[in-house]
């Protein structure tokens, strides 16, 4: 049983509660999200109970049994509860080994995620034409707009609320940036493959490459970042009350490096949300702060956001997928800061140029006072750290192992 969440009767949910939710308005939202997907079958571990979700025009049919499903998974009671309560996700279940494939392609299960969130929670699919990008005066909003620390706070707050992100220029001085660069170099020297506080990948030459260190707060130059007054003032622009990360906690402060020519690992990230490994209902909203030590340009490996997506559902997509959106890359320079809601979609495609310096960011986050891991574990992203060499598998590679 998941602490803080009720156990859901598998049969009663599918014959009563889920049809009620669909009839209450979730059906057309789910049908929109499930377009082009094969029927999904879910079987309860240790029993013969199974149900299939079958897309049709305008809705989803709930069918007893899984004979009609193209992809069939088997999960236990706690995992099913977590999926319905929005604390488990298909990617997190795959990386964490909390799902079994009985039939089909596990990437199809990943693609079902927006439809599942629509079915269970009425969360609509992100579609650009349905997002109102207007400023607080009702005029068209420029999603690439930037601000200064002394910009009008009502304008900044409205922009953050509307787009789900904010870019603020010249928050840190060149001297502060240089000190953080030196700290990042120290972290790079100390990182060890498999230390469980760093992410690694491989480049085209087969070399192991450091992508992220999760324990930056052990250095004095980074230990004060979570409570930095300038960052706390920016966080107060949001509509939520926050607590700062603990600097020495895993991911309390981290440093990431973009790298060229990567073919394994998570240096280049697909379209994702920061609660993509789980925990949306127990963590979100979170407000993630990125301090740029190098420029946010395509040549450097830009971070891009999907304006307004933090209120919607959106599926896993590689940045070069023909159906993928372009998004917006804030024109951040060294010393600039972005804030974004963790459940908003963002992407980190590879650098377009082979010569650096490449994007380097210092990360921290502001969270709800009651945020927690529903299984009591250290961090949701720890499911990515299972390999002894610290290598983080790409989503499609992890799915292919089933």
Image (spheres, rainbow, N blue to C red):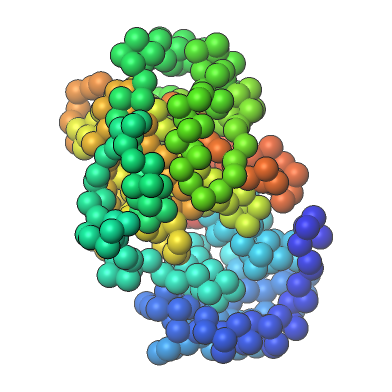
Left or right, residue 163 beside residue 112: left
Please give the name of the residue rendered at 54% of the width and 45% of the height, measured from the top-left corner. Answer: 286
102 w.r.t. 55: above or below: above
Of residue 78 and residue 97, the one placed in the foreground of this image is 78
Of the 4 image quadrants, the one containing the C terminus is bottom right
Residue 397 visible? The answer is no
Please give the name of the residue rendered at 78% of the width and 76% of the height, measured from the top-left corner. Answer: 9
The percent position of residue 389, horizontal first and vertical second, equals: 54, 28
Left or right, residue 316 beside residue 365: left
Please give the name of the residue rendered at 68% of the width and 83% of the height, measured from the top-left corner. Answer: 17
350 w.r.t. 210: above or below: below
Please give the name of the residue rendered at 30% of the width and 25% of the height, measured from the top-left corner. Answer: 170
Of residue 315 and residue 43, the one placed in the foreground of this image is 315
The percent position of residue 219, horizontal first and vertical second, equals: 55, 13
The percent position of residue 4, horizontal first and vertical second, equals: 78, 58
Residue 10 visible? The answer is yes
73 w.r.t. 233: above or below: below
The percent position of residue 80, horizontal first and vertical second, equals: 69, 66
The quarter of the displayed image where residue 6 is located: bottom right
């Amino acid at each position: 049983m998941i602490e803080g969440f009720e156990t859901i009767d598998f049969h009663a949910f599918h014959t009563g509660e889920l049809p009620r939710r669909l009839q209450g308005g979730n059906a057309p939202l789910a049908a929109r999200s499930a377009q082009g997907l094969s029927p999904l079958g879910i079987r309860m571990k240790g029993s013969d109970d199974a149900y299939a979700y079958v897309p049709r025009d305008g809705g989803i049919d709930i069918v007893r049994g899984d004979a009609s499903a193209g992809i069939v998974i088997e999960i236990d009671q706690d995992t099913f509860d977590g999926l319905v309560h929005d604390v488990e996700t298909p990617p997190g279940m795959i990386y964490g080994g909390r799902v079994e494939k009985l039939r089909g392609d596990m990437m199809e299960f990943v693609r079902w995620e927006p439809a599942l969130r629509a079915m269970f929670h009425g969360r609509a699919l992100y579609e650009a034409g349905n997002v109102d990008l207007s400023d607080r005066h009702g005029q068209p909003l420029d999603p690439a707009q930037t601000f200064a620390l002394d910009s009008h706070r009502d304008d900044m707050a409205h922009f953050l609320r509307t787009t789900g992100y904010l870019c603020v220029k010249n928050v840190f001085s060149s001297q502060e940036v240089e000190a953080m660069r030196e700290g990042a170099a120290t972290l790079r020297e100390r990182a060890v493959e498999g230390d469980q506080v760093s992410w690694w990948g491989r480049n085209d030459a087969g070399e192991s490459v450091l992508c992220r260190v999760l324990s930056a707060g052990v250095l004095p130059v980074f230990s004060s970042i979570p409570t930095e007054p300038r960052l706390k003032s920016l966080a107060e622009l949001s509509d939520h009350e926050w607590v700062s990360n603990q600097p020495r906690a895993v991911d309390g402060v981290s440093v990431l490096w973009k790298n060229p020519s990567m073919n394994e690992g998570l240096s280049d990230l697909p379209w994702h949300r920061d609660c993509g490994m789980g925990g949306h209902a127990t963590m979100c909203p979170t407000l993630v702060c990125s301090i740029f030590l190098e420029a946010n340009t395509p040549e450097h490996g830009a971070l891009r956001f999907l304006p307004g997506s933090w209120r919607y559902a959106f599926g896993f997509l590689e940045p070069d997928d023909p159906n993928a959106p372009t998004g917006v890359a804030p024109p951040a320079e060294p010393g600039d800061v972005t804030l974004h809601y963790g459940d908003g979609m963002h992407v980190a495609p590879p650098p377009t140029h082979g010569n650096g310096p490449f994007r380097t960011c210092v990360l921290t986050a502001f969270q709800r006072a009651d945020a927690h891991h529903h299984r009591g574990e250290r961090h949701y992203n720890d499911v990515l750290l299972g390999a002894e060499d610290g290598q983080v598998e790409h989503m499609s590679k992890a799915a292919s192992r089933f």
